[in-house]
Image (cartoon, grey):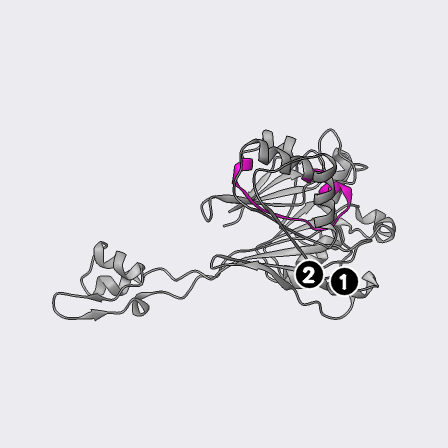
Amino acid sequence: MDLYFLGTGAGLPSTTRNVSAIALRLLSERGRFWLFDCGEGTQQQILTAPIRLSRLEKVFITHLHGDHIFGLPGLLSSRSFQGAKDTLHLYGPQGLARYVQTCLQVSQTHLTYPVEVHEFPSEMISEDPSSLCQGNVTPFTVWEDGQFQVQAAPLEHRIPCYGYRIAEREKPGHLDSARLNALGLSPGPVYGALQRGETVTLPDGHILQPTEFRCAPRPGRVITILGDTRPCSGSLSLAQHANVLVHEATFAAADQERAAAYTHSTAREAAEVAKQAKVGRLVLTHISNRYQETGTTQLLADAKEIFPDTYLAADGWNMTIQ
């Protein structure tokens, strides 16, 4: 499992950063990848990335600002040109289905595969986005199966916007080899049967139950990916104890008033969320093109002062989640 950053800029593309798009690669887990946001030029970014569009399974949209969705129609079309047949599932705010349908109808684009759009209920968003800074916001389940659960929660932005929490299911504990060795058993068929959850009867009649020879279950990994937002209770709820938090850092700490005016966060504010939520690592993205090389150095310094285990994402950069 790893995160591959296709676009890490904010608002406008630049020569070094495209607009928002992040791939969560689940190749060993599912043989697929999921896409979070799809700004203009995302399919072009994929051409030079270790990603195959045919393996795209789901797209999660945080909000309907252009730098997060303008690449979606082209990507859907390209996936069709490549002969895709599998259903593609899209998740996001209300209006997403109308946007996709309008683009496809006006351009007379005919897809070779079904698209299912799952829009979030309008009641999930308060009429006053600033109210999301107070009280508790409980994430709701967007999708789940035996491997993963994806939850979303509203954030504080100028238009309805969401963040996502991707939680891997708890894994069975490893076999307790010390106990098995004490019984004179070496790795082999008996180990394999117990690992598969099968009861084993030894030649002497001794019955081994698989639950008796397992260590404690292993917690699954958790990744939180937020859309554009001010610090709010929604971001804190989604980020609690995540292994990795991906948080926007559109502005430097010195531009805090500008960040508040445009309902974005500073790098320092992102770090404060990470610290309060007790996450493992923080990744900063959605970087304004007003910050050139020296400016991004300041963004990282602002965050590290509060939360040392912080990284600044760049286009084409990936992070493995252990």
- Label located before the other in sequence (2 or 1): 1
Amino acid of disc 2 = Ala
Task: Give the residue displayed 65% in from the left and 30% down from the top.
Answer: 44
Q: Can residue 286 be seen? A: no
Dot 1 crowding, Cα within 10 Å, few <14, some 14–19, many 20+: many
Between residue 201 and residue 116, name the one nearer to us. 116
Asked whether residue 57 is drawn in magenta, I would say: yes
Quadrant hosting residue 195: bottom left
Q: What's the mark number on residue 153?
A: 2
Task: Give the residue displayed 62% in from the left and 40% down from the top.
Answer: 5
Dot 2 crowding, Cα within 10 Å, few <14, some 14–19, many 20+: many
Q: Can residue 281 be seen? A: yes
Residue 190 screen position, x and y as percent: 22, 59
Q: Are marks 2 and 1 in contact (CB under 8 Å)?
A: no
Q: What's the mark number on residue 125?
A: 1
> Relative to 182, is 275 on the left or the right?
right
> Relative to 259, is 21 on the left or the right?
left
Magenta part of the chain: 51-72
Residue 55 screen position, x and y as percent: 52, 40
- The number of numbered badges drawn on the structure is 2
> Relative to 279, is 12 on the left or the right?
right
Amino acid of disc 1 = Ile
Find the distance from the CA under tag 2 to the CA under tag 1: 9 Å
Between residue 311 and residue 171, name the one nearer to us. 171
Residue 62 screen position, x and y as percent: 70, 51
Q: Is residue 166 above or below residue 4?
A: below
Residue 131 screen position, x and y as percent: 81, 66
Asked whether residue 11 is drawn in magenta, I would say: no
